[in-house]
Image (cartoon, rainbow, N blue to C red):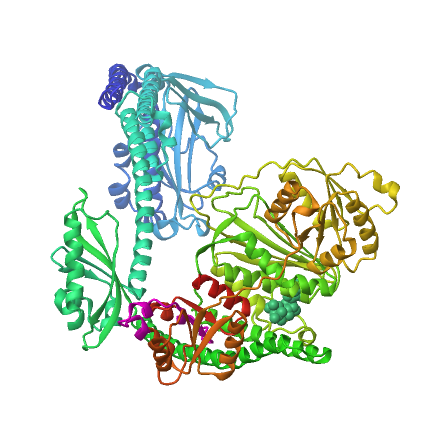
Amino acid sequence: MKIQHKVITILVSSFALMLVFLTIYGFLSDNQRIIHYNSIVESKKIIVKNVIQNQQGKYNQLVNDYSSWDGMVDFIKTPTKQWSASNLESMPAIYKVDYVWIYNPDLQPVFAKSITKLQCLDTLPIAKKQIPKLFKIGKNVHFFLKIGPNILEVFGGRVAGTKEYFHENTLTPRGYFFVAKWWDIPFIENLAITTDTDVEFDKSNKVSSHEIFADVKSDAHFVIRYPLLDENFKVVAVLKFENTLTTVARWGYYNQLTIITGFALLLLTIVLSISLINRWISYPMRRITKTLNTSDVSNISPILKRTDEFGKLSQLLVKHFEVQKQLYEEIDNHNKTQFALSEKEKSLSLLINNISDIVWTMDLNFVMSYVTPSVTQHFQYAPEEFVILKLEQLFIPKSVDEGVEFFTQMRDDLLKGKHHSNTGFQTELIIRCKDGKPLWVSVIAKPLFDDQANVTGIHGTMVNIDNYKKAIFAAAQAHQEVVNASAVKSDFMANMSHEIRTPLNGIIGMTELVLHTDLHDSQEIYVQNIKQSANVLHDIVTDILDFSKIEAGKLKLLNEQFELAEIVLLSLNVFSAKCELKKVELSCFIDPRLPKMVFGDPTRLKQVIMNILGNAIKFTDQGEIELRVTPLDKTYDPLHPQILFSIRDTGIGIPENKLHEIFDSFSQVDRSFSKKHEGTGLGLTISKKLVELMDGDIWVESKMEEGSIFKFKIPFLVSDSFEPAVFKQLEINRVVVFDNHQANIQTLQTYFDQLNINYQFFAECPISEKDMDQFKEAEVLFFNVQNHLLDYEDNLKSIRFFAQLGKKIVIIASPTIFFKIQKAVSVSKYPLFHLPKPYSFNVLYHLLEFVYSSKSLASTTIVLKKEQVVFPNKTVLVAEDNNVNFLIIKEMLKKMQVKVIGAINGMDAIDKLLKNDVDFIFMDIHMPDMDGVEATHVIRKMDDIEKQKVPIVALTADAMPGYKERCIEVGMDDYITKPYSQSTIINCLKKYLK
Ligand code: ADP
């Protein structure tokens, strides 16, 4: 129901109730009117009461008036007829009393008047003596006397005068004043009839003599009783008037009923209205108000289902609060976002204000729109001053073109879409600060795009790199100085090297020459020692030179094809004699899977191997040294082989804490060793640097007293046309090897496996014939013979036995031992075959091939004779200013049956060349007047074509990088560094004097 309907309902119901009330009221009023009317009729009934009561009041008043009258006092004192005539005579008639009489204080009558013919005063049936007693009760007396059938009502008062009258206690009577009136029976009866009142004489005597009772029990009932006295004032009867006023009572009842009903209806109307108003209006309003105050929608849930406006209002409120809640949530989120944003903004502005780099934006016309405050810090410009600068004004004059071009190029590229969206453009420019000073900045610029990915501008950063640039310039300058210093040092090293090498060359060459002369034993030992020391010195000089070359970054590696095994064996061969001397077993294993030829710098590889091997031999007094060359790991790619070189020794080992140090320059584990074992502490440093230059790595594992393994790996390149070697199947069925050397056994096993040869290894060779018999079937017998071993004799015995049987015997031994054995055995169907240690797979293969193909003793002589190389009829011109050196080379050449012509400088060389028929020239570089380079230059430019073609090989102590190139550049054919060996010279001549 709608509220308006509810209000109408409340009003209507109130109205209806009021109507009911009015109807009832009307009805009751109507009744009242009737009752009122009836009561008027009844009222006469109460007249009796009123008559009596009025009369009593009137007579009381009369008595009071006269008793307190001063005139009365005077009259009693002096009774005058005049006064009585004027004041008393007419009084009974006026006041309608039957008697008036007055006594003086002595109860003597002063005045008496009767208007009835009945008794006079004297006959007043009251004994005078009773009178004072009567007034003890009060000022006035009022009583009824029963006199015969009549009743006399008497009123009396003590006369006192005005002053005394009201002071009752002090009252001394001045006299007594009485009035009396007769109640005759007919009057009473008449009164009873007219007032419809019951009158009766009650003789029960239950009342006191002086009282009149007007007893109104209720509005509807009254009783008036008068006691009746005899002359002795004893109550002899009671006159009783009694009446019932029914209509008056009914009127009262109806009156009450009307009021109660009206009040009840009013109450009902009010309660009903209040409850309805409360239920329909106040309650929902309270709920809604509470909801609005607290925003708690649970307050309106009781009225949600109402169909009135409050119901709808509350539903709306619920929705409103839901929306409000969402709104608040959104506001909350918004606030949070706002907060986060403002925090971000704060930190951003903090960042912007605090970053020292300069961030800027500009449009495509290079008009700047923003720059961070940091611009002031670097360029002194306020941001607003900086943004209005034109591009041309930004840079110092020297940098303007570059700066403008940078930005213009970038813009053009961007507009042509040449660059990816986020490509940054970077450059370094010199800004012109406000005070005119130049400042280097690194500029990184990036494009700005709009929503459609169109380029709209450029933004970027400028970083102050002034200090950095200055530092770079300073560093470059310093570097240049260092480079210069280094060049000076290199020159110094080169000179030093040259200066040291030249006399060294003399020493070595001369000792070599001396050694070729007839010397007695001690002399030979001395000279050998000189040569050895000179070689050590040479090694040291070479090491220092290499080191300084590497340090100066001047060491360039060759990249030429070479035979890996050859280089490895060459390195080993150098040490084989030394090992033999030290009685240390030297073995080598080169994995047959490795490519034969690789690209790299063979000299430097050899140097590394020799360095490490040299150390191994140096620090190993017993046991063995093994060099293994294998693929680095199982994932071996023969076209890109990573080759691992391991050099294992059983020497003194290296303490763990020194392992990382030994590759440092001039580092030696224990200096005392260096005294015992010569060395500079540079060998491993150089090796490490060389391996690293070859893109490899070097490391060591070692245990004190057990030995060390140095390993290095190098990635080699092989020729594109490389194909793994294929070996022909050898038809050798059974090979027996007597060997107790583990490393060698392993090597042989691998090689035999590779060649599919059956083999058997025996640690000891047979000595008794019986034992030897079992090997009669073997095709080839291998003996690994070491001079120092105790079983050398056993080996010899065994070899001799099998040799006599005509077996093919291979002796694995050093050349010295082999020749010794060969000499001892002497007779054999087949020659003894020599497998010199260390050997490679190829060497073994070719040996076996040779052994397999050899038929009998007579056919082959395996003993190798020392090669005698001679170049008869050849003339070699040697340009050398140093006499000693000239002597050395001259002696060497003479042995080769070469005709030697000497020249003391470049000029002399040219002169001798022109005058002689020269086949070859050795040209020293540093010579007085004209050096070797210039001389070569002149020779190569000569008119004489023949002379131009003469091979020229540099012979110099200048080992510094660049020299060889210089020599080749001017037209020399080759380059030999001093000191050189005879074999180097032979090889060289072999190459050029064919
Ligand atoms: P050096 O010329 O003194 O041999 P290296 O650089 O070649 O200089 O070697 C440095 C040091 O490393 C050596 O002095 C030695 O103490 C230690 N060392 C090198 N190789 C070995 C090895 N095989 N066994 C024990 N110590 C070695």
Q: Is residue 952 magenta?
A: yes
In the displayed structure, would residue 837 be above or below residue 260?
below
Front one among 971 and 896: 896
Q: Report the quarter where the N terminus lies.
A: top left
Quarter location, residue 58: top left
Residue at the farthest bottom position: 929
Q: Which residues are magenta?
A: 937-964
Q: Report the quarter where the C terminus lies.
A: bottom left
Residue 672 appears anywhere in the view = yes
Residue 657 appears anywhere in the view = no
* Residue 36 appears left or right of 234: left
In the displayed structure, would residue 341 be above or below residue 609?
above
* Ligand 1 found in image quarter: bottom right
Q: Is residue 649 magenta?
A: no
Image coordinates for residue 545, horizontal then vertical, percent = 50, 73
Image coordinates for residue 727, horizontal then vertical, percent = 57, 39
At 52% from the left and 73% from the top, the residue drawn is 894
Front one among 550 and 299: 550
Image coordinates for residue 699, horizontal then vertical, percent = 59, 58
* Residue 529 appears left or right of 202: right
* Residue 857 appears left or right of 7: right
Image coordinates for residue 261, horizontal then vertical, percent = 33, 20
Front one among 763 and 991: 991
In the displayed structure, would residue 842 be above or below residue 207?
below
Quarter location, residue 736: top right
Quarter location, residue 99: top left
Front one among 896 and 23: 896
* Residue 33 appears left or right of 192: left
At 75% from the left and 57% from the top, the residue drawn is 823
